Structures are given as structure tokens and as C-alpha cells.
Amino acid sequence: MFKKSMVVLISLIFTIVSFSVVFSSEGPAGNDRKGKYTYRKVYKACAETGEIESATPKLSPADKTMEQWKTIFEAKTFEEFGCKDNWAAISDSDILDIYSYFYHHASDSPTPATCK
């Protein structure tokens, strides 16, 4: 009886660990929090130089689906965001963080978010 219980327990642990690895590896591997901060920082810099009227970002993650954000960030087409020069100066690491923020908080994600 003890051996059977241990086998069931080990199988259950293996299953839980397998599911957590699968779900945690979905989407870009950037830092969501840093991406949100960097995104806001880019818009603040744009407002200070007068490229845009407001430091409030015009796009939020919930404006598009995960697939739409994936298309934009993989093609590196950031015209929709404005501030072309600022976006061109962002490092690949920071772009990945911003992508992660937008992807994981898109309209069809488990935790949609808006920039407020």
C-alpha cells in the first residue's frame, strides 16, 4: 500500500511540475515589470522633447491580442507607437522586456492590463 501511494504521489508531482514548465514558458521571456517601466520612460522622454503632447502612452497592452503584439514586435514595426527615434535607440533587451509586458497583458491574456 505504501509503495502504491508513493508512486501516485511522485506521478502527481511530476505532472504538476510538467504543467508549470509548459505554462511558464509561453510567450517572450522578458521582464514584464521592467518592460512596463521602460515603456513609460520612453513616452516620458518623448513628451519632454516635444515629439508627443502627453507623457501618457497612447497604446496599452489590452489594445491588441497576444498574436497581434507578437506580429508587431517580431517584425519590429513600432510606427504605431510614435517617437520613432526613441524606439530606434532602445536596446534589444529592453525591447524584449516591453514585448513581454505587452504580450502577457494583451486583451486575450489571463491578465489584461491598461496603462494608467
Image: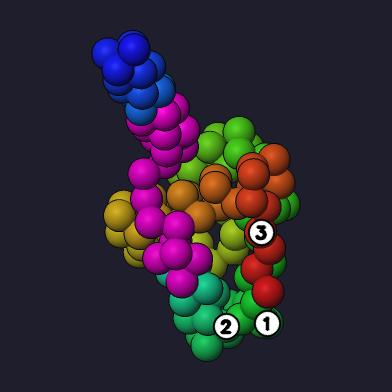
Residue at 66 percent across and 59 percent down: it is: 113
Q: Amino acid at mark 3?
A: Ala
Report, in whole angstroms, how far the alpha carbon at label 3 lies from the one at label 1: 23 Å
**Residues at circles 1 and 2 in contact by the CB criterion of under 8 Å:** yes
Residue appearing at x 59%, y 63% in the figure: 82
Q: Is residue 92 left or right of residue 33?
A: left
Q: Residues within 10 Å of mark 1 (few under 14, many from 20)?
A: few
Q: Which quarter of the image is occupied by the N terminus?
A: top left
Q: Amino acid at mark 2?
A: Ala
Residue 81 percent coordinates (x, y): 60, 59
**Amino acid under label 1?**
Glu
Is residue 33 within the magenta segment? yes
Q: How far separated are the C-alphas under marks 3 and 2?
A: 22 Å
Determine which quarter of the picture holds residue 16.
Answer: top left
Answer whether residue 60 is magenta in the image. Answer: no
Q: Nearer the viewer, residue 74 or 80?
A: 74
Colour convention of the picture:
rainbow
Disc 1 to disc 2, C-alpha distance: 6 Å
Foreground disc of the pair 3, 1 = 3
Question: On screen, 57 above or below 90?
Answer: below
Indicate the position of residue 63 as horizontal and vertical percent values.
Answer: 72, 52
Mark identifier at residue 13: none
Give the labeled residue for mark 1: 53
- Which residues lie in the magenta part? 16-37
Of the two numbered discs 3 and 2 on the same chain, state the one appearing first in sequence: 2
Q: Which residue is under mark 3?
A: 113
Residue in front for this viewpoint, 53 or 15: 15
Q: Is residue 94 above or below residue 65?
A: below
Residue annotated with mark 2: 47
Frontmost of labels 3 and 2 is: 3
